[in-house]
Amino acid sequence: METLGAPGAGVAIALENLFPPLPSEVILPLAGFTASKGNMTLFDAVLWTTLGSVVGALALYGVGALLGRERVVAIAAKLPLVSVSDIEKTEAWFARHGRKTVFFGRMIPIFRSLISIPAGVERMPITVFTLLTTLGSLIWNTAFVMAGYLLGENWSLVEDYVGILSKVVLGVVVLAMVIFVAIRLADRRKGSHRAR
């Protein structure tokens, strides 16, 4: 950010979308802090980070579109404990809730990046995807850039609090996966007992 200014913040956020371990909860408040020091304007910080979010999301949308439904189904068919009916249920769910998921998903750590891939697989209209991504990212980015701007030297406090939220989200995902695996293994056992 010091070298490239606001465009550097945009590049960092685009990379954060592609590599989720890079946390936006650090990049965005730092951009706000940098703006508070006068190295860029607040408007530029929000504009460039939102542009970076959209570019990164579109790249992952492209990955999903390239994979396509057939490849995803073929991959799912080879995975243990996953069935093609799981993909069909996910598709039906995404058809009903995809727009809300893309919009609100931009404001949930971890899912911010991942939601672009199923949107691409399902070929959500690109204009709708871009609009929802832009709006959701604008809200998320503005909140965190403003937090860094207002906190000044204490901008890193944002990471501490959002880190807790990220851990909660990750915990819920892990718990959901454990429950899913346990149910699948129980179903398999029932199926093998019936076969006897």
Image (spheres, helix red, strand yellow):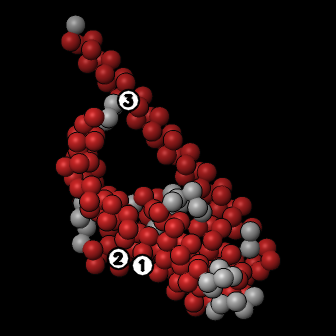
Residue at 42% x, 78% y is: 134
For marks 3 and 2, give the CA distance.
Answer: 37 Å
Residue at 34% x, 76% y is: 130
| Residue at the far top in the pictured view | 196
The secondary element bearing badge 2 is classed as: helix
Upstream in sequence: badge 1 or badge 3: 1
Q: Is residue 139 visible?
A: no
Above or below, 190 against 94 in this view is above
Mark sitting on residue 130:
2
Foreground of the two, 31 or 93: 31
Above or below, 162 against 87 in this view is below
**Crowdedness near tag 3: few (<14), some (14–19) or many (≥20) residues, C-alpha within 10 Å:** few
Pointers 1 and 2 in contact (CB under 8 A)?
yes
Upstream in sequence: badge 3 or badge 2: 2
The secondary element bearing badge 3 is classed as: helix
**Crowdedness near tag 1: few (<14), some (14–19) or many (≥20) residues, C-alpha within 10 Å:** many
Left or right: where 74 falls relative to 24: left
